[in-house]
Image: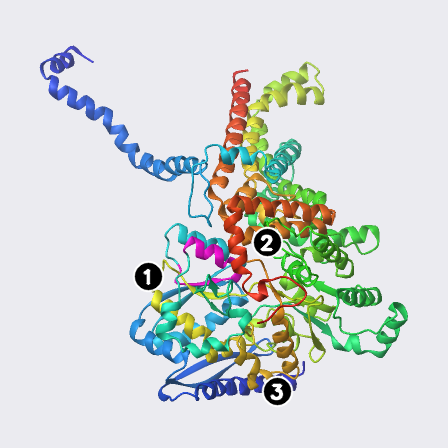
Amino acid sequence: MSTKNTKMLGLLLIVGLALMVLAAQCGAAATPEVVEKVVTVEVEVEKEVEKVVTVEVEKEVSTGGSSSERAVEAAKELCDGVELNYVREAGLQAQDPLAMAPIWKDLTGSTVNVIEMSYLDMYSNQLQDHLTGGGSYDVVDVSPLWMQDFVNAGVLEPLDPYMEKYMNMADLEDYLPVYSSEGVMKINGVTYGLFDDGDVFMLYYRKDLFEDPEHQEEFKAEYGYDLVPPETREQMFDAAEFFTNKYAPDLYGLAMQRLEGQAYSWFIGPFSGAGGQFFDEDMKAQINSEIGVQTLTEMVQQNTVMPPGVEKWGFMEVLSSWMEGKTAMVITWPPIGRWGAGYGDTAKQMSWVPASTVKGKVGYMLQPGGRPTLAGGFNIGVSSDGANKECAYLFAQWMTSPDISLQRVMLPFALRDPYRISHFESPLYRSAWPEAPEYLDKLQEATTGQWELGIPGAREYMEAIDNAVTAAYAGKDPQEAMDEAAARWDDITERLGVDSQKAAFEQWQQNPWNRTGPEVDIP
Amino acid sequence: MGVAGVASEATEPTTGTGRLRRKRLTPWLFVAPCLIVILLVTIFPTIYSLGLSFTKWEVTLQEKPFIGLGNYIALFQDDRFLHSILITLIVVVVGVGIELILGFSLAQLLVADMKGKRIIVAALLLPVMVMPVVVGYTWRLLWDAQYGPINQIIGWIIGEPFTYTWLAKTPTAIFAILVTDIWQWTPFMFLVFLSGLAVLDPEVFEAADIDGAGGWDKFWQLTIPLMRPIIIVALLIRGLDALKFFDIIFTLSGGGPGNSTETISFYIYQVGYQFFRLGYGAAAAFVLLIFLAVLLTFLLRMFRSATEG
């Protein structure tokens, strides 16, 4: 990148951040407010790799009716000097609270310590802390997948009393329903978490490759139909095969995370989209049905058009390959779509990620096959063992409030993805890079997806699929692999109690986005 | 004790008994802090875990009922657990066996004085000083399909790009795990055997030379029998360690693909700390403890017979 371009981008980013804060203020202007304090927010922006500039943005903080303001006002009285321990996934996920904690301290006098751990350790460590009566964490980060287990174990504090006391309840309407419904923020109608990460799989593709007339002509001659951004899994495979055959090893047609641990996420959406069912009426596992086996067979076949060694690829390998322009399509979480477009290139926190070589070439599509996986996501919750539950709640409310959460999902290095209606409609966000409106619209469209199974023992159910998937990648017959996984599902169900599991599954299915099928039946 | 002493004890029985009691108590007072710590951090958790292993302790269940030997019976009907035993035995038998042979061979090679011996010995010992977790992550990079040096070197040899994914296929994943473990722990065996060989009485070998014994005869008839106690101690230490093999599995293969490279320790970690089936995990841990006890008894018996012989 030339120095001139870098400076321009840095300047744009600075202006963007300033506008972002102003817009946040405009958003809050609907309610009467009194300017009470001026706080200086420092945002570090890196220009080229060695040069760091500091941008100062003035932020007016007002009292009034918004949830963020109410949280700040209450915390100033209750939480001055209070220390809160907040669990976050290690690495980039932790950068957002590390950036926000000093602002919270300036506003309220309360310190937030960010405790980092791996994604899978977040499940075990947070549970373990509760089981041992630890009280080490005040604010917890919980995937909807784990909510039932955490609620059953008593890890989470019910939030409804706090919400009634402090939240501007109109802000709840700003959540996309997919993220605020039963099994996500709520268990049996009780709110245990404030949703904070709109994780959903998308297909990102190279527009320049798909729109190249030469490619289109060759593809049509070979496959008999037009080369288009894929809507079906068959189209995706054909396009991937075409680009791999033509360009490998310089470029491969497709890349997805295949590493054990979260490999199950790439099974759930296609399985649901094809009409697969998790259980029958007697709670017998149905994942080894014809649809389940076909889904897994296709996943194994897809590996043949991906880079060598993809079976051990995690998020970072997919990201690097995409940013370096070595892949025509990837299916992954939303941040790759932003970073590929160059949003975030200048952030210091992103200096270890390869700079995007595909700026202006990124197209956005839904995960082919009908239902994108709503993969993971996070709720911010309050630990029932914490010594400062009220302060923990106020911090959670502030972080997830419309204005503050917009700033957070727009941080160039953020791993938290848009989840509020106001995020998707934000003029500032929609002007963040040229293709941002297309990105946000597709992202919102993708929220017709399928949640991962979130009933008691979910971690173990998902691990059984994970094992089946990685075993099939290693050469095991997909039918045999899925039969073993289904047998494990039945064992888990019987162990935890068929009746209670059935009741939990029925309750979980009250959320339309939890019910499998080609289309979500949105109320 | 002299006559005066006897007279004194006879005339002052109370004082004498008190002194005797104090004498008996004093050693206990010295070891008491240590005993208390051991009781608190070892004995109590062990007994507690044993109790836990007889219950159905699931994180999502409110009730934690007593189920007797239910967990133990279920364990031996659990294919995944039985497979983890098989993988553990492969590591113990094949891995430790190769480490023994390589370590002994290297020690034999380097026991004699030679130029640069100190540097060679120091270099050979480096792997054993590295944390197993670091070893696991490092070898994960070495085995990488696209960028790993192992594939790169094979590619140079065969004259075309080689991109095999070692850790994604079961047989080669086990092979990679064994190679990694052997790389790290052969130096330990080497060090133990080198120390043992260095202190063998040279006169025995000189006498054998005079009797006209050949090198092979001396190795089988003298070196091996004289080294037997040391070999057993080395096997004991490495065998017990290998039965608890965890770090390299965790970092290198994650137990995969599927769960084909899970060892008993890894399985216990999964069940106990990932799924919070604490009763079942405790039962599995006790089965591992029994394995360890059996191996320990067997090797100690061998050691005793070797030293007595």
Residue A147 colored in magenta in the image: yes
- Residues rendered magenta in the picture: A137-154
Q: Percent x, y for residue B202?
A: 60, 22
Given residues A171 and B114, the one toward you in this image is A171
The answer to whether residue A465 of the structure is visible from this angle is: yes
Given residues B102 and B81, the one toward you in this image is B81
Q: The residue marked by circle 1 belongs to what chain?
A: A
Q: Dot 3: what SS? A: helix
Give the mark nearer the N terminus: 1 vs 3.
3
Q: Where does label 3 land, which residue?
A: A8
Residue A289 colored in magenta in the image: no
Residue type pointed to by label 1 = Ala
Residue type pointed to by label 3 = Met
Q: The residue marked by circle 2 belongs to what chain?
A: A
Q: Residues within 10 Å of mark 3 (few under 14, many from 20)?
A: few
What label does residue A387 carry, if any? Answer: 1
Q: Where does label 2 land, which residue?
A: A462
Question: Left or right: where does residue B95 sit relative to residue A236?
Answer: left
**Snapshot colouring:** rainbow
Instruction: Please check whether the numbered discs 2 and 3 fall on a single chain.
Output: yes
Q: Nearer the viewer, mark 1 or mark 3?
A: 1
The answer for how far apart the CA atoms under marks 1 and 2 are is 33 Å
Give the mark nearer the N terminus: 1 vs 2.
1
Q: Percent x, y for residue B138?
A: 62, 52
Q: The residue marked by circle 3 belongs to what chain?
A: A
